[in-house]
Amino acid sequence: MKKYALVEIGKPLEELDFPEPVPTGTQVLVRIRRSGVCHSDLHIADGYFDMGEGNKMELAGRMQLPMALGHEILGEVISAGPDAVDAPIGKTMLVHPWIGCGDCAACEEGRENDCLDMNALGIRRDGGYATHVLVDHPKFLVDIDGLDLDNVTHLACSGVTVYNALRKALPLLESEWLCVMGAGGLGLNAVAIAKAMGVSNIVSVDMDTDALSAARDMGVSEIINAAETPDVIRALRKLTNNQLLAVVDTVGNEITSRNSVEALLKMGRYIVVGLHGGTFKMPLPMLPQKALTVRGSFVGSCKDLRELIELVRKGNVKSIPVTTRPLDQADATLQDLRDGKITGRVVLSTDV
Ligand SMILES: [Zn+2]
Ligand SMILES: [Zn+2]
């Protein structure tokens, strides 16, 4: 098998050859067909998250290097361990990568994304930038029969992350507004899924003209180019007729957080999923005075992913722009993502 692996933090990925792994216990071996390239892979390759004010959360020691990055994984199940009952051998399935310790209360309730000791694929151990991956149990495989492979891969991270966040942000009345901060892979999926969940008034905020035009194509009612708007808070209030009740922040930096809490109406809900980094500051009296809810949301559960796939099957979720590239473009794609050259999602494929 081949891996496009992070060998040393901060260095380009390397192409490495390994013997094909043999699944044991409940494991299944998946021959990877698609692998999405997510913005958080940049943080993992850099080896830290920016905690603000010069502080970093170092990731070294939490990862098993060399490690194939990539957590949006789709492929054919080709073999299974002796205890992997009902493994769907020969079927192409979407992998739920957010695997927990398997032992805690969250894991036992199927909320592995809330586990304190997650062991996610492509985050702490080998993931999708490879020809093969071992998955712990067939229960982490999601049936995507009949759906377009290129358009379904990114649902395993970017899709399920915003689906979970939107469930915390909604419901909204017909006159109320949702703001989606950022129009990258997460932001565009947030728009598509929010619309499928029945939200009609959506404003998208970004600094990139191409990203905002993609958001327009996804059907947002209004856009704000933050690079050209001197007062984003005032613009948000005006465009939403002062009816902004929910923000899903797919960027998560000091500016987007400040703009969100300032522009939200009383009883507003601010849900952060973006990992851009920095510190969150707001005037404390604003929390009680506006009775704000400030919440984080981290990826989603396998149940969330199955629900999202069902929503997609109903045909109401518009696909974000997806570009397919060969698997050996993994490192070049990360570089393009870093340079802001990608609109929507790049999906690496072993079928081209
Ligand atoms: Zn991701
Ligand atoms: Zn756990």
Image (tube, helix red, strand yellow):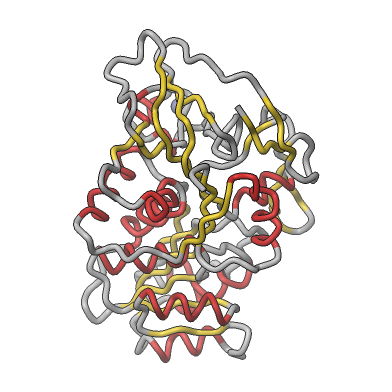
Residue 140 lies left or right of residue 120; in this view the side is: left
* Quadrant of the image where one finds ligand 2: top left
Q: Quadrant of the N terminus?
A: top right
Query: How far from the left and from the top, in percent, is residue 65?
Result: 71, 29
Residue 64 lies left or right of residue 128; in this view the side is: right
In the image, farthest residue toward the front = 352
Residue 209 lies left or right of residue 215; in this view the side is: right
Question: Which residue lies at the image location 35% right of the left edge and 70% below the top edge?
Answer: 267
Quarter of the rendering containing residue 18: top right
Tell me how many marks there are: 0
- Decide: is 207 above or below 144: below
Q: Nearer the viewer, residue 32 or 254?
A: 32
Q: Nearer the viewer, residue 286 or 321?
A: 321
Quarter of the rendering containing residue 271: bottom left
- Decide: is 109 above or below 293: above
In the image, farthest residue toward the top = 82
Q: Nearer the viewer, residue 54 or 292?
A: 54
- Decide: is 175 above or below 118: below
- Decide: is 117 above or below 42: above
Q: Nearer the viewer, residue 155 or 328?
A: 328
Query: How far from the left and from the top, in percent, is residue 195?
Result: 28, 69
Question: Which residue lies at the image location 39% right of the left edge and 55% below the top edge?
Answer: 151
Query: How far from the left and from the top, in percent, is residue 352?
Result: 52, 48
